[in-house]
Amino acid sequence: SQTIHQWPATLVQPVGSPLSLECTVEGTSNPNLYWYRQAAGRGLQLLFYSVGIGQISSEVPQNLSASRPQDRQFILSSKKLLLSDSGFYLCAWIRDGSYEQYFGPGTRLTVT
Amino acid sequence: DQQVKQNSPSLSVQEGRISILNCDYTNSMFDYFLWYKKYPAEGPTFLISISSIKDKNEDGRFTVFLNKSAKHLSLHIVPSQPGDSAVYFCAARITGANSKLTFGKGITLSVRP
């Protein structure tokens, strides 16, 4: 069966510090991968998606970047965090040709 | 520009009664719709979906209705149970658009015992 992992589960970082969140998927190959953010009182905003290794598409201009160094690994990064980067970050995957995305457990990021 | 709208931020119902969660969309290109359920500090879990070629899909206590002409869909939960208390997100996609989903802001459902 397929599983998706995210870490860390929670993170508290000062403004201006770097960020690296990792997402890995097991039990499937060549998935589409997605990073979402849920800010306080808001819905799920798509940040990045990837259809293959090294292929990253950005949905909104922001202080973050994403990379996909391996087929089942998706990384969300920032060189310098802003207060507005606080939120709940979710990774999701979908099998090509399928319809439902499946989400990881999420990372709660608090920028202080 | 909010293409998927969940205009009611919260809903409270009595256990055993029906819960009706509404969702509206503006993009007529959407052809597949999904509902997700989310508990605090967890990732959303897929609940039920419907293709634009259908007007109803049922799975146990959950039924989704789609009215394409009104660009409106709704999720019915009957009977509602306290464990259904969560945030429910409506999402929509366009086939072929890299499987991207557009989400609404969510509705917080509270089921009172």
Image: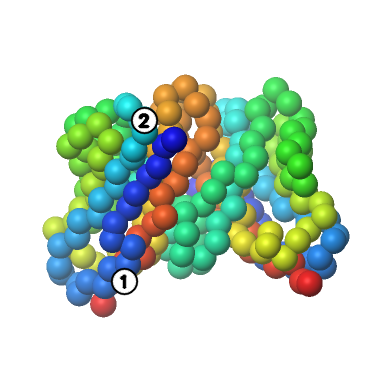
In the rendered image, residue B49, in percent from the top left (x then y), is placed at 64, 36
Q: Do badges 2 and 1 share one subunit?
A: yes
B56, A95: nearer the viewer: A95
Q: How is the image coloured?
A: rainbow
From the viewer's perspective, is residue A21 above or below residue B63? below
| Distance from Cα at disc 2 to Cα at disc 1 | 31 Å
- Which residue was labeled with disc 1? A110
Instruction: Give left or right: position of B1 versus B72.
Output: left
Subunit of label 2: A
Contact (Cβ within 8 Å) of mark 2 with mark 1: no
Number of other residues with Cα within 10 Å of mark 2, as a class: few under 14, some 14 to 19, many 20 or more: some
Instruction: Give left or right: position of A43 versus A57.
Output: right
Disc 1, SS:
strand
Query: Between disc 2 and disc 1, whose residue precedes?
Result: 2
Discs 2/1, front? 2
In the rendered image, residue B54, in percent from the top left (x then y), is placed at 73, 26
Disc 2, SS:
loop
- Which residue was labeled with disc 2? A28
Res. B73 in view:
yes
- Tell me the quarter of the image containing the N terminus of chain A: top left
- Residue type, numbered disc 2: Thr
Instruction: Give left or right: position of B87 versus A13.
Output: right
From the viewer's perspective, is residue A90 above or below residue B83? above
Subunit of label 1: A
Q: Residue at x 33, y 27 (%)?
A: A29
In the rendered image, residue B63, in percent from the top left (x then y), is placed at 76, 41
- Quadrant of the image occupied by residue B92: top right
Q: Residue at x 29, y 57 (%)?
A: A7
Instruction: Give left or right: position of B61 versus A46.
Output: right
Q: Residue at x 42, y 37 (%)?
A: A2
